[in-house]
Image (cartoon, helix red, strand yellow):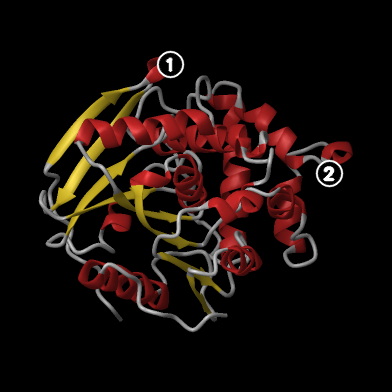
Amino acid sequence: MAALYAATPPLRTDALGVSGGHVLHLQEFGNPDGMPAVVLHGGPGSGSSPLLRRFLDPNRYRIIGFDQRGAGRSTPRGATRDNTMADLLADLQAIRHHLGIERWLVVGGSWGATLALAHALAESQAVSALLLRATFLARAEDITRFFQGAVADLPEAWSRFAAIAPPARRHALLEVLTEGLQGDAPQAAPFALAWWRWEAAMSGALPPTDEPEGDALQELIGRYRVQSHYLSHCCWLDAPPLLDRCGSLPCVPTAILHGGSDHICPPDGARELHRRLPHSTLRIIPGVGHDPTHPEMVAAMLRALDSYAASGRFEPEVNS
């Protein structure tokens, strides 16, 4: 198995104030003179993970990681006010200016890939390359499929998930979850835990045994509160749809990596994105799901990022 790069201490840690009273937790790692790369976490609302930075060689990259609004160590946690796609795009610009970076490689997985695409459309001059893993396109059908479309594949898990809603509202689970997650912790906890269990079932993970408690449960509630807020608005990417705008993306090196068995973000979206971006490379990895730590996904990510650091381009992949 290919080994991730070793974890390194941060070069700097900032609390960056942005609009609406939000304060972003921002860190830099790696080589201060290296190739700038920003790593965008998933969710929305999940917060950054040290693991995601370890795909990049700290000797060759200047690695920027941050928690998006309402996520991780950014404050206020779980806040949905002044938290839209437009706000996140403004934050990326603010971070880049704060750090004195003109252009950067943008690395994103799942929701992070969504944000990477939106950022490249909004500030094409700021993006030197894109690495997109498990891309989520925020189409209405993608959102519906996650909440309602896996009944046939996972009938027992879906029945347990749907039990959070009254029978008459089980056709509108996102709406029910969004409403439930807006309350205080005792009210919101059952909705967050139901979502968490369903996501684990969709990812193919073993059924969770120890449920989050205390601060971990508070983090989970905040994560899904932000996520439901975005998904219930189609992430503000439906007019026009993100995919329909991708033909306007800058012609920069773009690598698309996707698990062939990803049930959270099925690979048809990655194939369609690649079709719209003829300059991109695509690799669909058989037997890999949504998990970025699968050995074959780790190897593919490392190979792509090492290739870009060495040559300024991603090595060609077999298009799938």
Residue 164's label in the rendered image is none
In the foreground, 184 or 49: 49
Crowd tier of the residue under label 1, counting other residues whose Cα lies within 10 Å: few below 14, some 14–19, many 20 or above:
few
In the foreground, 196 or 10: 10
Mark in the foreground, 2 or 1: 1
Residue bearing the label numbered 2: 171
In the foreground, 91 or 77: 91
User: Is the residue 154 above or below the residue 1 in the image?
Assistant: above
Q: Secondary structure at mark 1?
A: helix
The residue positioned 60% from the left and 59% from the top of the image is 264
Query: Hey, which quadrant is residue 90 in on the image?
Result: top left
Answer with left or right where residue 283 lies relative to residue 104.
right
Mark toward the start of the polypeptide (2 vs 1) = 1
Answer with left or right where residue 53 lies relative to residue 271.
left
State the residue lying farthest toward the top.
21
Residue bearing the label numbered 1: 20
Looking at the picture, which amino acid does disc 2 mark? His
Which corner quadrant holds the C terminus?
bottom right
Crowd tier of the residue under label 2, counting other residues whose Cα lies within 10 Å: few below 14, some 14–19, many 20 or above:
some
Looking at the picture, which amino acid does disc 1 mark? Gly
Query: Hey, which quadrant is residue 48 in on the image?
Result: top left
User: Is the residue 221 above or below the residue 297 in the image?
Assistant: above
Q: Secondary structure at mark 2?
A: loop
The residue positioned 73% from the left and 34% from the top of the image is 175
State the residue lying farthest toward the bottom.
318
Q: Position of residue 216 (x, y in %)?
A: 41, 39
Q: Position of residue 79 (x, y in %)?
A: 48, 24
Q: Position of residue 37 (x, y in %)?
A: 27, 52
